[in-house]
Image (cartoon, rainbow, N blue to C red):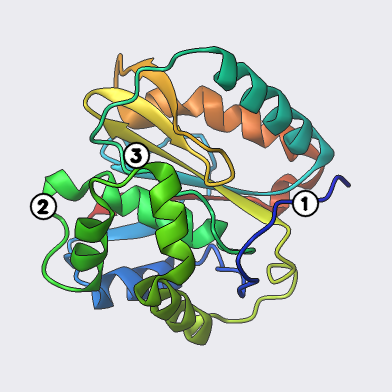
């Protein structure tokens, strides 16, 4: 398999795609208990229309690495219209893509007033107004991010097969009526255009693309949704 050769500031313990862990992190950090992550056992079937964010977790593969290289080149040649309200985080530490997806899901729904006083609110307030490159430099030194990740590591179940750091996380959110794909290994968000229906319906075909990359190990994938009680 193609290896990820990106240079990172340090190597961290991978974040599991476990809703219990994610919910413990966000609720202890100021997110309203009304909102929580759930694992969608049916995959892209019956996606919840009310979801504010979707996170797809899949094993890295040669197909994904090839796609990523081509997509980076394609995006570099086009001028995307990116809303200034999108908060995008580039991965600064190895094995940190899970935490980046969690932050993407929350930061780009901050206008929904789901985040109260606490670590998350403070973290996102600092992140606003920065460029993606500035955020990446900031994340390398962020004590808040390190604390969040260390807290998650203590909560995890150490599930076999999920601690090799070979899984990647991609987040889908709606910002200003547009669908954005946020992959922390890219340098910019991907704007998939104006939403014609719900976030879930519009994101489905893009999630199916990633499912095709993991077709030989589909049982080792996870789809999370941020929803209300």
Tag 2 residue:
113
Q: Residue at x 70, y 54 (%)?
A: 220
Q: Pick whichever of labels 2 and 3 is earlier in the sequence.
A: 3
Mark 1 residue element: loop
Q: Which mark is residue 5?
A: 1
- Image spot of residue 83 (x, y percent): 27, 27
Q: Is residue 201 left or right of residue 176?
A: right
- Image spot of residue 64 (x, y percent): 73, 36
C-alpha separation, residue under disc 3 versus residue under disc 1: 36 Å
Image quadrant in which you'd find residue 23 = bottom left
Q: Which mark is residue 48?
A: 3
Q: Residue at x 23, y 49 (%)?
A: 128
- Which is more foreground, mark 2 or mark 3? 2
Image quadrant in which you'd find residue 52 = top left
- Image spot of residue 228 (x, y percent): 22, 53
Q: Are marks 2 and 1 in contact (CB under 8 Å)?
A: no
């Amino acid at each position: 398999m193609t290896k990820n050769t990106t240079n990172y500031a340090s190597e961290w313990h991978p974040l599991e795609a476990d809703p219990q862990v994610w919910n413990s992190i966000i609720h202890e950090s100021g997110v309203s208990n009304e909102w929580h992550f759930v694992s969608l056992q049916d995959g892209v079937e019956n996606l919840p229309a009310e979801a504010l964010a979707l996170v797809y977790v899949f094993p890295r593969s040669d197909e994904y690495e090839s796609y990523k290289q081509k997509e980076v080149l394609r995006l570099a040649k086009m001028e995307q219209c990116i809303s200034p309200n999108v908060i995008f985080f580039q991965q600064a530490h190895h094995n940190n893509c899970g935490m980046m997806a969690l932050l993407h899901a929350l930061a780009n729904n901050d206008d929904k007033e789901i985040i109260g006083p606490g670590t998350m609110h403070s973290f996102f307030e600092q992140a606003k107004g920065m460029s993606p490159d500035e955020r990446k430099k900031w994340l390398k030194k962020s004590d808040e991010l390190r604390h969040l990740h260390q807290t998650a590591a203590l909560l995890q179940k150490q599930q076999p097969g999920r601690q090799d750091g070979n899984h990647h996380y991609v987040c889908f959110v709606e910002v200003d009526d547009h669908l954005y794909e946020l992959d922390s290994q890219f340098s910019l968000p991907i704007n998939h255009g104006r939403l014609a229906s719900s976030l879930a319906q519009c994101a489905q075909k893009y999630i199916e693309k990633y499912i095709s990359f993991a077709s030989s190990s589909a049982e080792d994938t996870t789809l999370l949704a941020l929803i209300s009680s």
